[in-house]
Image: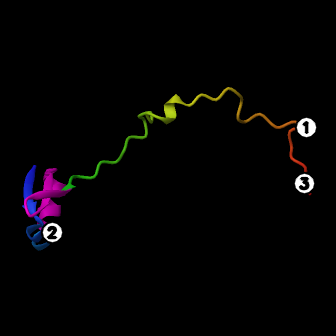
Amino acid sequence: MQKINIHEAKTRLSAVLSDVEKKGEKFLICRNGRPVAELIPHRRPSRLEYHPVLSKIKINYDPVEELSDDEWAEVE
């Protein structure tokens, strides 16, 4: 991971983004020597991986089952 200051990042933004896109490089953008942001390649999330929180939800009924007449709300 390369460290660059904000001025250099602004001056060379196109070149920095090209390095991130083509080479997969990561940059740590600093202000006065302190880290402010990381510039990393975008990674599209996999649609095949289970979500860590949503995978814990359990449904104890059939969500496509039709409602009975008693379960429909009264329409005023």
| Residue 64 appears in the picture as rendered | yes
- Gap between marks 3 and 1 measured at Cα: 13 Å
Question: Residue 43: percent from the left, percent from the top?
Answer: 29, 48
| Residue that label 1 marks | 70
Tag nearer the camera, 2 or 3: 3
Left or right, residue 51 beside residue 60: left
Task: State yes or no: discs 3 and 1 in contact (Cβ < 8 Å).
Answer: no
Which quadrant holds residue 13? bottom left
Q: Earlier in the sequence, mark 3 or mark 1?
A: 1
The residue under the point 7% across, 53% down is 2
The residue under the point 12% across, 57% down is 34
Q: Earlier in the sequence, mark 2 or mark 3?
A: 2
Q: Is residue 63 shown above or below 6?
A: above
Q: Amino acid at mark 3?
A: Val
For the record, the magenta segment spans: 14-37
Q: What secondary structure is marked by label 2?
A: helix
Neighbor class of circle 3 (other Cα within 10 Å; few <14, some 14-19, many 20+) is few
The residue under the point 67% across, 26% down is 60
| Residue that label 2 marks | 13
Q: Amino acid at mark 2?
A: Leu
| Residue that label 3 marks | 75
